Image (tube, grey):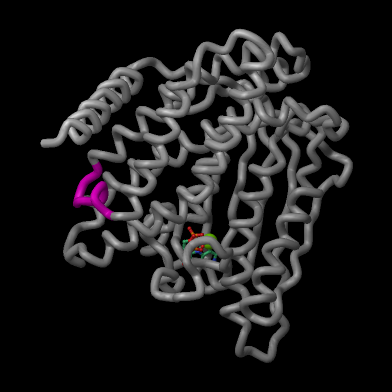
Amino acid sequence: MTAARKAAEAAGKAVQEEVRRWGGMKQTGVSLRYMMEFGSRPTDRNLLLSAQFLHKELPIRIARRAIELESLPFGLSEKPAVLKVRDWYLDSFRDLRSFPEIKGNGDELAFTKMIKMIKVRHNNVVPAMALGVQQLKKDLNPKVARSDLEEIHEFLDRFYMSRIGIRMLIGQHVALHDLNPEPGCIGQINTKMSPIAVAHAASEDARFICMRQYGCAPDVTIYGDPDFTFPYVPSHLHLMVFELVKNSLRAVQERYMNSDKDAPPVRIIVADGIEDVTIKISDEGGGIPRSGLPKIFTYLYSTAKDPVDEDSNTGSSIIMAGYGCGLPISRLYARYFGGDLQIISMEGYGTDAYLHLSRLGDSQEPLP
Ligand SMILES: Nc1ncnc2c1ncn2[C@@H]1O[C@H](COP(=O)(O)OP(=O)(O)OP(=O)(O)O)[C@@H](O)[C@H]1O
Ligand SMILES: [Mg+2]
């Protein structure tokens, strides 16, 4: 063995050991309310404290994921797409650990720049993992029971939940540097978010994709008080409503495509309760058979064509449906701030999705 190779191997071992050490440390969660209170005073001192917290917290969270990525069942860890994801996690861990102690505001700015880059590096984790899972699904004996895949499903739930938290923390720290925030906004949190306005924008985005795919799109009508607002992260709500409306539009479109009847609109109802804000998305797209219901929240189930087979969709372009992760990921976003997502179907008629968002903002981040 050459000296260079020996040195490289020793360095690799040292990183491995450090990942193990950090992966064993305790994670610290924060709540929406805490982020809001802390972020309402983005002074230099607070930004420094926030950076120092992230300098310690992010490597712990990232190390846990890197460790888990190496021990997945059925050889999922060895799939090229998954190896790529693992390398992103290791690179980010190294970047964070090699960054010296943050002492002043100059260090803080450099650190912020670095974590912004880390966030970009991990942009495509979901499609990359979905690709890995699709590759695995192809090699697996179709007789492998669904209960065996449960382990993969649970891993992905933990993995994506953790990713939501990491991205929220980085995004929030970066956004607090904005010198001219929109009125009412504290970082990524809008203290006066109108769920109707967000639902409207997300529905229009979903209709645009539907239009592109099918040439037309059913209407979406929204009911509720347009003046009602509450504190939430608009980008999260946008993502969830976008996924749910996309599913509804697809179901309605497929059902009415060759019919001479007009496609019925998708209806969104926003209700403001004391504990929860609930958003119901109802369609008349024919529903989901009861036997399919247990599968819809898994990452391996989609009734859409396999997107990996289509050259035009390499995972980066948005399509109506494909990987089967729209619902499980939306539910994670809802749960991240203490909410939930339920799907009720009437086969032969349509589907209702109930998206519950916790108004209190006190729930701690779930930390897998
Ligand atoms: N409103 C709905 N009406 C009928 N079927 C639905 C509805 N919502 C979801 N489904 C069924 O549940 C499956 C899983 O939905 P999910 O959004 O998780 O994945 P997908 O839409 O197939 O792919 P993507 O990852 O692009 O969202 C869908 O393929 C579809 O069969
Ligand atoms: Mg979907």
Residue 336 appears left or right of 172: left
Task: Name the residue located 34 percent from the left edge and 62 percent from the top edge.
Answer: 134
Asked if residue 305 can be seen in this view, the reply is yes
Q: Which residues are magenta?
A: 72-79
* Relative depth, front residue between 255 and 216: 216
Asked if residue 275 can be seen in this view, the reply is no
Q: Quadrant of the N terminus?
A: top left
* Relative depth, front residue between 209 and 104: 104
Task: Name the residue located 44 percent from the left edge and 22 percent from the top edge.
Answer: 98
Task: Name the residue located 51 percent from the left edge and 43 percent from the top edge.
Answer: 121
* Relative depth, front residue between 179 and 249: 179
Picture layout, residue 329 above or below residue 130: above
Task: Name the residue located 79 percent from the left edge and 38 percent from the top edge.
Answer: 193
In which quarter of the view is residue 81 placed?
bottom left
State whether the magenta stretch is mostly helix, strand or loop: helix
Residue 81 appears left or right of 120: left
The residue positioned farthest toward the left in the image shown: 1
Coordinates of residue 256 in the picture (x, y in percent)? 62, 82
Residue 158 appears left or right of 229: left
In which quarter of the view is residue 146 placed?
bottom left
Coordinates of residue 136 in the picture (x, y in percent)? 27, 59
Q: Is residue 74 magenta?
A: yes
* Relative depth, front residue between 3 and 43: 3
Q: How many marks?
A: 0
Coordinates of residue 49 in the picture (x, y in percent)? 63, 11
Q: Quadrant of the C terminus?
A: top left
Q: Is residue 256 magenta?
A: no
Coordinates of residue 216 in the picture (x, y in percent)? 71, 79
